[in-house]
Amino acid sequence: MKIGVISDTHLTGPGLSARKIASKLIYTTDKTLEELHRVLKPHFQDVKLILHAGDAVDLIVFEMLQTFAPVKGVFGNMDSHAVRTRYPEKDVVEVEGSRIGLVHGWGSPHGLSERVKECFDESVEVIIFGHSHRAEIEKSGKVLLFNPGTPTDRRFAPYLSIGILHLENKVRGEIIRLE
């Protein structure tokens, strides 16, 4: 089974610009929702599920992703009130016998993977997270730590990316560079 993995999309709806939420300025990128859909289509058109690890910013991102497959998500530090009321801060998703932890992350990029690991018990096989905008896959003990990076904002990322989580004989993560 293929699962689409995405985080830190930072997009708002048509005609919306940066706005304040909880006294923080939410920034937008130069990418539009339509551009993101076009870029994702070759990679997500055959996935069975999409996991979004936060900072979608607007519910319209989840609606667009649902045109490919069902979506599970969590909120991040830049998400709107609407996203925060619809999605949890963290979640455990069970798919084909695998337990997948989903959380956005917080704080400095240094030590982020260790902080998100502390959010879950040892029953999860994979932890998907975001926040740093930097794609990474690492094994920590028996847990696969998987940050898909960002498909829209190179501010902290060397390249734009998404991920695919493969659930076959063993769990495997794949980073897909979008440029």
Image (tube, rainbow, N blue to C red):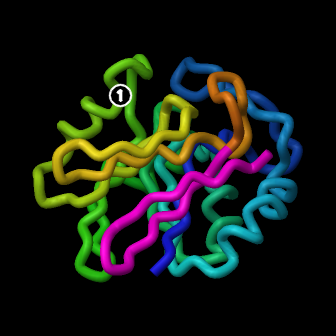
Residue 44, above or below 179: below
Number of residues whose C-alpha sits closer than 10 Å to that of mark 1, classed few (under 14), some (14–19) or many (20 or more): some
Q: Which residue is mark 1?
A: 112
Q: Main structural element of the magenta stretch: helix, strand or loop?
A: strand
Q: 81 or 57, which lies in front?
A: 57
Residue 19 position by quadrant: top right
Q: 22 or 64, which lies in front?
A: 64
User: Amino acid under label 1?
Assistant: Leu
Residue 87 position by quadrant: bottom left
Classify mark 1: helix, strand or loop: helix
Tell me if residue 89 can be seen: no
Look at the image and give the residue range highlighted in magenta: 161-179
Q: 164 or 74, which lies in front?
A: 164
Q: 20 or 32, which lies in front?
A: 32
Residue 154 on image: x %, y %: 72, 29
Quadrant where the N terminus is found in the figure: bottom left
Residue 20 on image: x %, y %: 64, 25
Quadrant where the C terminus is found in the figure: top right
Magenta span contains residue 57: no
Residue 142 on image: x %, y %: 18, 53
Residue 107, above or below 35: above
Magenta span contains residue 166: yes
Residue 25 on image: x %, y %: 64, 21
Q: Residue furthest left?
A: 122
Relative horizontal placement of residue 160, taking residue 3 as reference (left or right): right
Tell me if residue 105 can be seen: yes
Relative horizontal placement of residue 28, taking residue 90 as reference (left or right): right
Residue found at x 57% / y 77%: 47
Residue 26, above or below 96: above
Residue found at x 29% / y 46%: 139
